[in-house]
Amino acid sequence: MSPGYDLVDLLTLTRQLGGSDLHLSIGAPPVARIDGTLTPLSDSPMEANRCRELVLAVLTESERSRLEKDWELDFAIQVRDIGRFRGNAHYSRGNLEAAFRYVPAEVPDLKTLGHGTIVEELCRARQGLILVTGMAGAGKSTTLAAMTAQILEERRGVVTTIEDPIEFTFHHAGSLIKQRQIGIDTRDFASALRAAVRQDVDVIVVSEMRDQESVAAALTAAETGHLVISTLHTRSAVGSLDRVVDIFPPAQQPQIITQLSSALVGVINQKLLPRADVPGRVMASEVLVMTPATSAIVRDHRFEQLYGLIQVGTVHGMHTMDSSLYHLLTNNFITAEDAILHARDPAAMKEDFKEFLRQQNKNRR
């Protein structure tokens, strides 16, 4: 990387190396995340003034004003011949820094991402709430986009997305699509959700439910005949329900639990793990589907019992994260170390894999 590089140069190099993210931090060289691993793009650490120049150069005047006011900014930029990136500008120890996530031009379908047919079926629900969950970098936004694309093709209705910022861009298909960006097309998530109910919308896709107001508005929309799909930062499908309830003060939690038990359609939890067979990453997932049994457990706030129902709920399309990891492991997509590291029950994963290897050796004789 030449000394006179700009942000476009860094984003271009990130994609040429197959990276998903670019990080600009003071005192460290520009760093790309490639297949989950951080890789320096230069030998020289970034200075504060240089980093600030790189970030501000790609912002509009209104975006600069928002950054000065809020000290945080989500935005999107398009790099010619490279693609679209979601950016986040923020301060660290008084210095402006940033992170950028690549957004593929084409929305992959759910099967290509690694989802089973149950996720396709969840997209066909006419109303209720579907949550796509996982930690940062788990591919939630891509799954959300793939679900949106399927709905646009299969349904005849109106789909509204509420995003901060807009990442994937869609075109009208079987359904009409309205993409609204926070700070440009609407004030905030909660306001946009409340407005959508009055806009003859059939499906509402929310990039993230961040606070009490947006969660409450999403639950209300799901209860009043709309299909609402959104993301949450959580480690498991069951943990997602705890997260939703814990956002609210104790006095409101019984009402929220009742709403969840009637409005929730399903929860998809996912992780992206390094592939063992080829370069890249592969998705492991967990799916909770609401049935009369799971709804009753949610209504009674017995969330700890849901994992057992997921284990025995294969007939309804449910599966645990551990079963997904075991499938990936026994098909040589991931290493035993990664399967054990990410398992809910590492000891059981270890024993199950040992038994699998014993059976394989026995069959070879």
Image (tube, rainbow, N blue to C red):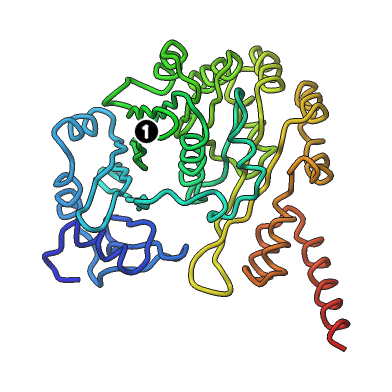
Q: Which residue is mark 1?
A: 172
Q: Secondary structure at mark 1?
A: loop
Locate residue 99, reporting x and y percent: 33, 50
Q: Nearer the viewer, residue 43 or 265?
A: 265
Horizontal side, residue 138 vs residue 191: left or right: right
Amino acid at circle 1:
His
Relative to 225, does residue 244 appear above or below in the rendering? Answer: below
Q: Nearer the viewer, residue 174 or 145?
A: 174
- Whether residue 95 can be seen here: no
Question: Which quadrant is home to the C terminus?
Answer: bottom right
* Residue farthest left in this picture: 4
Locate residue 29, reporting x and y percent: 27, 64
**Label total for image:** 1
Q: Nearer the viewer, residue 302 or 330?
A: 330
* Residue farthest bottom in this picture: 365
Callout 1 environment at 10 Å: few (<14), some (14 to 19), or many (20+)? few
Task: Give the residue drawn at x 31%, y 36%.
Answer: 72
Horizontal side, residue 101 vs residue 240: left or right: left
Horizontal side, residue 264 vs residue 140: left or right: right
Q: Nearer the viewer, residue 303 or 142?
A: 142
Q: Quadrant of residue 174?
A: top left
Relative to 222, does residue 8 appear above or below in the rendering? Answer: below
Relative to 317, does residue 334 appear above or below in the rendering? Answer: below
Q: Quadrant of residue 299?
A: top right
Task: Give the residue drawn at x 42%, y 26%.
Answer: 160
Task: Give the residue drawn at x 76%, y 32%.
Answer: 303
- Whether residue 248 can be seen here: yes
Locate residue 4, reporting x and y percent: 11, 65
Locate residue 212, reporting x and y percent: 52, 21
Task: Give the residue drawn at x 66%, y 62%.
Answer: 341
